[in-house]
Image: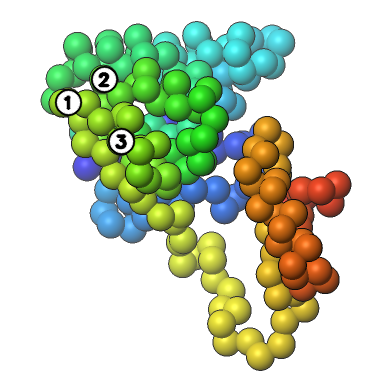
Amino acid sequence: MKILHIANFAFNKLGERYYSIDRKISAGLIENGHFVYDYSFRDMARMGTIFKTKKLGSGVANNEVLKIVENLCPELVLIGHSDLLKKETLQTIRKNYPSIKIGFWFVDWLCEQSKANFIREFAPYVDAIFCTTGGRLLTQFKLPNNKIGYIPNIAQKSIEELQQFNKDFFLRDFIFFGTVYKDPDREVFLTHLVQSLGENFHCFGAFDNKAVYGHK
């Protein structure tokens, strides 16, 4: 297939997010014989105005998506974490190119209402929704016109190349990379781990500990 993959490829991060899920998905699709055209929505939105802000440039990026669909004629439009993509853009693709399939993936926990809201807006216009959250938080997006499915967090052999399971000695027993911002349940859980595991547990990005990205 020819696939248009609209996601957040984070070109502006200069390689520190090279292991992101969007890149893994594109790499896997290419390995399976498909052509993938990556469109980094937030980056292109920032480039759309002299102010370099993604919200102001979102209209430009939405118009570019329609132009790419016209030029590329993809069999599949795959969308991930593009909250500034407008439902009207999907409506136009549906109307003008009824044979194109549209899929949507999401890899953050769906506890925040704001995250669920924009997925709910997309739901009537996509053929399939894939999330790393299951249960009732996923089934809320099920409509007669779409399919929904749980997916695990994806690993890609060219990125996750370390083989820690072959080691006999470890500097750290358990690590966490991420934040607790606006997530009280996660903060309570991590606090419990810190108290239980002590020096055997290391956080990066939470509890005033500096985050690490890229090769580090």
List the residue tagged with mark 1. 145
Give residue 13's position: percent from left, percent from top: 68, 39
Please give the count of numbered marks on the rendered protein. 3
**On residue 124, which mark appears?**
2
> On the rendered image, what quadrant is the C terminus found in?
bottom right
Give residue 118's position: percent from left, percent from top: 44, 21
**Residue 38, relative to residue 58: is it above or below?**
below
Q: What residue is rendered at 54% in x and 30% in y? A: 112
Mark nearer the viewer, 3 or 2: 3
Contact flag, marks 3 and 2 (Cβ < 8 Å) = no
Give residue 59's position: percent from left, percent from top: 50, 9
Q: CA distance from mark 2 to mark 1?
A: 7 Å
Q: Amino acid at mark 1?
A: Asn
The kind of secondary structure element at disc 2 is helix
List the residue tagged with mark 3. 139
Q: Amino acid at mark 2?
A: Pro
Query: Upstream in the sequence, badge 1 or badge 3?
Result: 3
User: In the image, is 56 to the left or to the right of 201?
Assistant: left
Question: Can residue 78 be spotted in the picture?
Answer: no
> On the rendered image, what quadrant is the N terminus found in?
top left
**Residue 42, relative to residue 171: is it above or below?**
above
Contact flag, marks 2 and 1 (Cβ < 8 Å) = yes
The kind of secondary structure element at disc 1 is loop
Q: Front-most of 103 and 24?
A: 103
Q: CA distance from mark 1 to mark 3?
A: 13 Å
Q: What residue is rendered at 33% in x and 48% in y? A: 150
Query: Upstream in the sequence, badge 3 or badge 2?
Result: 2
Q: CA distance from mark 3 to mark 2?
A: 14 Å
- Residue 74 found in image quarter: top left
Q: What residue is rendered at 35% in x and 38% in y? A: 136
Q: How many neighbours does mark 3 have within 10 angstroms: few (below 14), some (14-19), or many (20 or more)?
A: some
